Amino acid sequence: MAMGKRRRDEQGIFWIPTAQLPQSSGHPFYDRLSGILDDEGFDRFVEERCRKFYADKMGRPSLPPAIYFRMLLIGYFEGIDSERGIAWRVADSMALRRFLGYTLTDPTADHSTLSRNRRLIDLETHKEMFIWVLQVLARKKLLEGKTLGIDATTLEANAALRSIVRRDTRESYAEFLTELAQSSGIETPTREDLARIDQKRKHKGSNRDWENPFDPDAKITKMKDGRTHLAHKAEHAVDLDTGAVLAVTLQGADQGDTTTIEETLEHFQCFHSS
């Protein structure tokens, strides 16, 4: 039986094939964006760049690279910062299904498929896609790149501060405090003893001495609300004339803006010269 919509009339219930259902117009923005991507050969470009990531043996159903990167664009334009949120939004929207090439009855990619593709496709390929989009914007006269605004924000890392270890001995923070307590004459230190010793220590949160083994790039830093956490710093360069994001870098959260701005400018210059 053809997939369709059930409708009741005087003679009973029958089915209307999905292909015969009236088609509503798509979202003007995504229709226009899809047209630009098609004209520029986006799908062919992405397919060629991601061919090296294909597995020799068949496994779980694959997600075409073009759909994966289009879903990332949706996340950006819709302001969705999680793969689960992107997957839910796509499954719920007819306009976004149309933008991705899904029909009404096609199952859309779930968040685990998005996550797996993100892990399989390396950072350099993601950068190539980013630069490709910027080059299209430049050809369409949608960015100038003459006046830049650079700003950074501190993002809490998905890593627990209590899990940090010493870089030299790999002992945990609790083990380190226990040794300090025992060397000061406290044979069996309590939690209160450890907390008291910790309060008296200077430079106890030095990134030179400590790291999180699960996220070595995360740095111990004080957040804007005064709390101390493991964090990263994301820095953006934006074209002030059009609002286009021209460069994004991930920096150590313990680094000052005057230090990290140089790398962000280098990333912009790489695009500008390409």
Image (cartoon, rainbow, N blue to C red):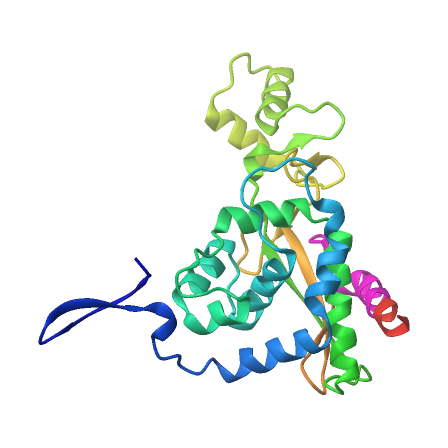
Residue 49 in picture, x, y percent from top left: 76, 56
Q: Is residue 45 visible?
A: yes
Q: Which residues are magenta?
A: 250-268
- Residue furthest toward the right? 273
Of the pair 258 and 182, the residue shown nearer to us? 258
Residue 245 in picture, x, y percent from top left: 70, 73
- Location of residue 47 with respect to 147 vertically, above or below: above
Of the pair 134 and 189, the residue shown nearer to us? 134
Residue at position x 72%, y 45% from top?
53
Any magenta on residue 252? yes
Q: Is residue 250 visible?
A: no
Residue at position x 44%, y 64% from top?
89
In the rendered image, the quadrant that contains the C terminus is: bottom right
- Residue 73 quadrant: bottom right
Task: Give the total of numbered labels.
Answer: 0
In the rendered image, the quadrant that contains the N terminus is: bottom left
- Location of residue 67 with respect to 216 vertically, above or below: below
Magenta highlight: main SS: helix
- Residue 10 quadrant: bottom left
Left or right: where 185 falls relative to 3: right
Residue 42 in picture, x, y percent from top left: 70, 68
Any magenta on residue 56? no
Left or right: where 106 falls relative to 157: left
- Residue furthest toward the top? 187
Residue 5 in picture, x, y percent from top left: 27, 67
